[in-house]
Structure formats: C-alpha cells, structure tokens
Amino acid sequence: MPTTAPVPPAGATVLLRGRGDVDGQPGDEVITLFSDGTLHAGHWVGRVALTGAGDYFMGEQAGIRVEVLDGSVGSHVVVVGLPTAEEEDPPNRWQAFRPDGALLRRILDTTPGSYGVTALRFPGDGTVRYTQDGWTACQGTAGQDVAPVHEITRGSDGGGDLVEVKRTPTGAIQACDQLAACPWIYVEGAGGPVKVGEILRELRGKTSSALQALELPAAPSGPLVLRVAEEEDEVTFLDEIFVEADGVRIYPASCAAAATPAYCQADHVPLRMRRGDVLALTFELPAATAPVVFARGYYVPTPSRP
C-alpha cells in the first residue's frame, strides 16, 4: 500500500529516496536510505552497510529500487547500489533486502566488479545475474593471454541468501594483456607525429603511482615537441613530466607560465586525462642528445556504465 516518507532518525539525513512495489499489492511504497544506514520501505525497516563514498560518486552511481526476485511467489526485493570509497572510478557494492516480518532482511551483499558499475539483472526466477568485467575475468589467470567472460548466477542457498550457483560462458573473451593500458608518447617531426611508446605502463590504480622513463629518438638541440595522448578507456593521472638530456632535467616550457600546470611538479595534484585528450609539450634541449622522458602518475580504467 502507498506510504508517506518516514521521519529521519535523530541526527540523520536522507541519502537516497525512491518508490517501488515492495509487497506486490496495489500502490508503491516510499523507500528511503538515511545517512546512518537505516533503510525504510513502507513499514519495513532494515540496515544498509554504508561504504563511505564521496558525494561525487554517490551522485553518479548510487541508486535504490525494487526488483521482482521470484514472480511465481510474488517475492520482491529492495536493491541498494552504493559506490565504494575508492577515489577513482570505484566499483558499486550491491545490497538486496527482502521483507521478513517487520524487517528488511539482507540476502545479497556483493561487489561484483573491479571498476564502475557492474549491473545486476533480476530475471524474476529467484536469481540475480551479472556479467564479469574484464578485470574480474582475468583474475587468477596469471600467465594466460586470454580469459573467458562468464555470466554469474546467484540463487538461494536454502536459507534465502543469494550465493553463486552457476557460471555460464558468454562467448566473449578478454585479452588480459590489453587491460594494462596507458597513454602514448609521440614525437613531433617534419613529417608529423611519430609514436614512440607507452608511458606509465602497468601503473594501474593510485597505489601504483610511480616515476617511469621512456627513451626517445636522438634529437638536435632546440625545441623537442612531445604529444601525450590518452587513447584508451581510462583516466590518466599525470602528476609530473620532464625530459632528461645529458644529465640535465628539463621541464616543459609551459611550466614557466604564471599559472603553473598540474604536471609541472610532483605534488599529488595531477592532471586528469581522459580518452581523446592530447597534451602537446615543448622542451628546449641544450644540446644534441638521446633524451629520455620521465612521467610520474598512474591510470585507472573506466569501463562503460549501463
């Protein structure tokens, strides 16, 4: 039956609110998640495990809804999706609650993906399903070039909790060596840009941030123009970039500007580069040399959201 919004617990504020048919009867119930983790759906009350996610990703990824778990018996669940507290492209933690007496009983608590939102599907037959992302598919496949991508099915364990009961190959294959993406370095020449190689290789995630080098072709004295191009589905966090030539460290000419760009010093306040972004940098080489470019930072994959 329809309900009005509940009174917030003392000191709590509303995190999420929605409406849905929780009991299978005419009319929707108001569904409210409060900042202390209290979950109201009609006259049922439960407790959500909060993730500590920041406001930005809460606004981008959090959601609350009702799904039909088993249409044959009229079983409905309240589904809450919250991003985890990771700083960049966090995976969603999913929790599902079923009415049980006056309570909302949690029957599912899972973080199925590595980055972003891995969508849950409720076919209405008592199960919940999702498709592995590439990173999850390649877990535990050290030394293998490819991994099959599976659809994961969770069903009742006999006590009502939803546990993994089946893995079904989707037919898709993930090339595991393609997960280690990173930005490309080009050298501008008379005939146009020449691709030299990748930088920030294998530095996936903030905890992997490091300084990495890439040797460049021999160059005369004077201006050396490099292009840093982000060409993959990821975000590069470029904290610092410079060139060394004959033992001399040379920063981009743009670092002499009054408003110093973020990539001019290693201060943990990086420049963010998304797919399609290109950064053109000029370095004044003091003499003919075989320079080396150094970059400090890391990248984070950004899988497509549903």
Image (cartoon, rainbow, N blue to C red):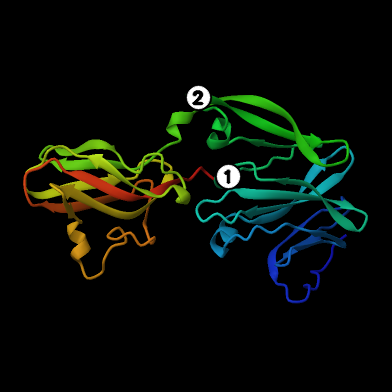
Residue at image position (74%, 40%) is 122
Give the labeled residue for mark 2. 146
Residue 282 spot, x, y in % from top left: 17, 53
Q: Nearer the viewer, residue 285 or 189?
A: 285
Q: Amino acid at mark 2?
A: Val
Which residue position holds label 1?
306
- What secondary structure is marked by label 1? loop
Image quadrant in which the C terminus is located: top right
State the residue at coordinates (70%, 55%).
Answer: 64
Identify the image quadrant of residue 30.
bottom right
Residue 278 x/y as whole percent: 29, 49
Residue 166 occupies quadrant: top right
- Which three-letter amino acid code belongs to the residue tagged 1? Pro
244 displayed left or right of 118 = left
Q: Position of residue 121 (x, y in %)?
A: 69, 40
Extreme residue toward the bottom, this view = 11
**Is 32 placed above or below 139 here?**
below
Q: Dividing the image into 4 quarters, which one contains the N terminus?
A: bottom right
Q: Nearer the viewer, mark 1 or mark 2?
A: 2
Q: Is residue 20 above or below residue 208?
A: below
